[in-house]
Amino acid sequence: MAPELKAGVARSDITPPVGIPHANWGAQTHTRAAGVDLDLWATALVLQNGDEKVAIVDADLGGFSTDLVTACRHAITELAGIPGPNVRLSAVHTHSGPSLDFNFYAEGGELLGPYVASLPGRIAGAVWEANNNLRSARLAAGRGHSDINVNRRLKQEGLYDGKVFLGRNWQGFADHEVVVARLDDEDEHPIATIVNFGCHPTIMGHLNKYITPDYPGVVKRVVEQMVGGKCLFLQGATGNVHAIRDYTGDLAVYRRLGTLLGLEAAKVALGLSPLPRQERFLYVLESGAELGIYADEPAGEPDGTLRVLSREIALPLLPVADAAQIEAELAERQRELEGLRASGAPDEDVRQAMMRAKRAMLRLRLAKPHQGQTETMVELHAIRVGGLGMVAIQGEPFAEIGAAVKQGSPFAHTMFSGYLGNWAGYIPNAADYPDGGYGVTTTPFAPEAAGRVIEESLASLRQLVE
């Protein structure tokens, strides 16, 4: 009997042109990407069981804008016939990819518009191809461990006036669990591997001028080399976690850390058996020693249940500043920056101006969508594939949120992710608000939001098993 679950996978190259805006750091002095170190990909996995069908897209982007999410889902529905709520768009959140929105300078805009306009077609094409590649499939999931991540909220007497900054907090919480799912076809050939891990892809920092997918791109390449098939990387809860080496211009660093994580994920994937087997003793063979001969026989089909649930949940907001006032400040900061660059000012003067423009842009990004609101709606997307639960939320949740959801989940294995669809802001733990620091000062959400994300995520997962 063939498995009821079907799966198909495909990939599209979404590498931008050299010279595109590369404005992801307030401390940088360059404006355009000077080259490409590794290509960027959009990888699409389509799953089907009966009338239920879902598409999961892993894109090597920092994030999606609201307009881009809408355009991609529309293109996927038009081309592949999969309804928007059944499409999960996930960004790996690389900080060394192109700057798609909220740029704080105009340079490179002539390349940005055509590139962004091309993305819905490229991504929909990958989903369409994956949908055409559907074949019988089985899934198994497992866990591994990686120490490439560390809590990044450091507050220590004698450092930075005792205030929180983004450092290496070895005593803080970081989720080191690597959740891996492997999909094989009916003949036990690998179709796809899904890797879920939480670590900010900020290894390539302000000194880097190259387009890279950061460590998630290396993870995918390593897993594909070792396991076969295609690999998707679903970014976890990373709001307060980054890599053990970060903010560098050394391309070898992200390649090394990505290789370490990729090898761990590949080890887990290779140890999985999507087709359940049972041991049967056959006989003793007389040789130089007495050899026990066994057969490992199929033991039925695994659970291929497929369900998807997409809904919006309300998260409470903090009061926000006046967007018009910040917009005027940002315009002034942009003029200041452009003047310094045009005059050939020293790098340090340009760096300081970039920082001021970037911070104004961040404040505007928080304030503009939430004027006069006390709460906002964000998307929560949950998928069940057999004994695997997958839940994702817009925004950048702190690591403790993801760990709490996984711990309370009714599934044997659970993948929790942020970076679903368009960016919604950081989601800190309530206990972190008094200390402030980046991630808290840059969130639109009130302290109660974290608890609500945990509660609603668990409710969605429970609904998928009812």
Image: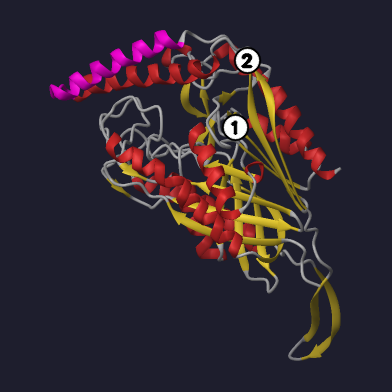
The residues colored magenta run: 323-346
Residue located 37% across and 35% down the image? 205
- Residue occupied by mark 2: 446
What colour scheme does the image use? secondary structure
Question: What amino acid type is highlighted by mark number 2?
Answer: Ala
Q: Which mark is residue 353?
A: none
Q: Residue 458 at x, y = what percent?
A: 77, 34
Q: Nearer the viewer, residue 148 or 416?
A: 416
Q: Which mark is residue 394?
A: 1
Give percent across and percent down for residue 109.
30, 34
Q: Quadrant of residue 34?
A: top left
- Residue 442 highlighted magenta (yes or no): no
Across and down, in percent, residue 48 comes to: 70, 57
In this view, the residue in front, 314 or 247, is 314
**Callout 1 amino acid:** Gln
Q: CA distance from mark 2 to mark 1?
A: 15 Å
Number of other residues with Cα within 10 Å of mark 2, as a class: few under 14, some 14 to 19, many 20 or more: many
Can residue 156 be spotted in the picture?
A: no
